[in-house]
Amino acid sequence: MTGPLSHPPLSPTAPPPAASPLVDRFARTISYLRLSVIDRCDLRCTYCMPERQTFLPKAEVLTLEELHQLALGFIARGVRKLRLTGGEPLVRRDMMELVRVLGRQLEPGGGLEELTLTTNATRLAEFAEGLHAAGVRRVNVSLDTLDRANFARIARRDSLPQVLEGIAAAQAAGLSVKLNTVALKGINEDEIPDLIGWAHGRGMEITLIEVMPLGEVDEDRFDHYLPLSAVRERLERRWTLTPDAHRSGGPARYVNVAETGGRLGFITPLTNNFCDGCNRIRITATGQLYPCLGGHEQVDLRGALRSADPEAALAQALDLAMHIKPERHHFAIGKAGEAPHLPRHMSMTGG
Ligand code: SAM
Ligand code: SF4
């Protein structure tokens, strides 16, 4: 049931009852699940996937029923925050059906506190109102530039107008929008202050992300790796940044920008100063559970779901996941020409 790497042997003690909370060997309680609902995407961001990405055959992707069953299983074991991601979640045809059925878990007694989405926003204009009606209150939108030509270069698709329309529609529908921006040396680094000012001027939080070594892409990611320490230094020459104690249980650290009045996050995944408080796990669209974004450990939940006794197999698989969740991640950005450290793409694990 596990991936290629060995892991510590399971303790011989009896497994906890099915509804026990998810607590790993380092006493971290898992309350946040990122569930990828599809590996496909309508964009081809250069740092994320190659132009000719091979997508999975449909039979390998979890069905709507399986995604629902999985989510309910996790909620029963204490997951309170569920983020749907991809690939691009809004290109999955039955996506809104899933959102609606999971939205019911937000009702009193349902167990879920927050249902969110990470999206590239190309189709957000169409779905924003439906998302809000289903109980979604916040969405994360990935946006690396406000320049149409640069967007087309980064995403390999000329979709900036649709994305901006999607963001506006989300705000109009009452969704709070947070932007995620991958900082890319020589590509969008000079635009970062404008992007921050634009986001804050429209009441959006924005978080900058360092490029991570996940999966083969056409370009050499090392060429565009931009340490956020350098970005922060440049921003501090222009603005007053005051640390903000806000924590999301993930790698982001926040500051407030006095001049714009907004909050700015920095995600530096190549450091591991956040692992101690990690509260999250990720599942790919094929049902592979990755206890750590930066680790090789994995557990096959699709096999459990498609077994003769899914409930028992799932409970056992989740116990195993808690047992093998590593204490810290093992990211390292490869030097030019080296293979990326982890073979899977972010479009599999969903970021
Ligand atoms: N398609 C949706 C989107 O772009 O928001 C959801 C999935 S995407 C994989 C989730 C996030 O991962 C995006 O914010 C994207 O910028 C980020 N991402 C993808 N590949 C990355 C990489 N190699 N390093 C850092 N961030 C990456
Ligand atoms: Fe698609 Fe998101 Fe990857 Fe861009 S980052 S190619 S939008 S999955």
Image: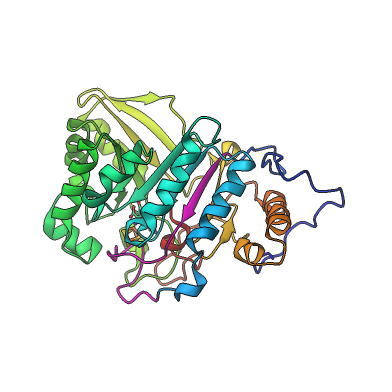
Q: Quadrant of the N terminus?
A: bottom right
The residue located at (51%, 64%) in the rendering is 62
Residue 207 appears anywhere in the view: no
Residue 329 rendering spot, x and y as whole percentages = 57, 51
Q: Residue at x 47, y 36 (%)?
A: 106
Left/right placement of residue 274 relative to residue 166 reads: right
* Towards the viewer: 72 or 344: 72
Magenta run includes residue 235:
no
- On whether residue 51 falls in the magenta region, the answer is yes
- The image shows residue 210 at horizontal and vertical percentages of 37, 50
Say whether residue 88 is visible.
yes
Q: Quadrant of residue 258?
A: top left
The location of residue 153, given as percent across then percent down, is 19, 64
Q: Quadrant of ligand 2?
A: bottom left
* Residue drawn at the location 46% of the way across and 57% of the way down: 36
Determine whether 74 is above or below 58 in the image: above
User: How many numbered badges does the structure rendering display?
Assistant: 0
**How is the protein colored in the picture?**
rainbow
- Which secondary structure dominates the residues rendered in magenta? loop
Relative to 270, 192 lies left or right: left
Residue 193: image location, x then y, percent? 20, 39
Q: Nearer the viewer, residue 10 or 82?
A: 82
Span colored in magenta: 31-54
* Near-viewer residue (271 or 264): 264
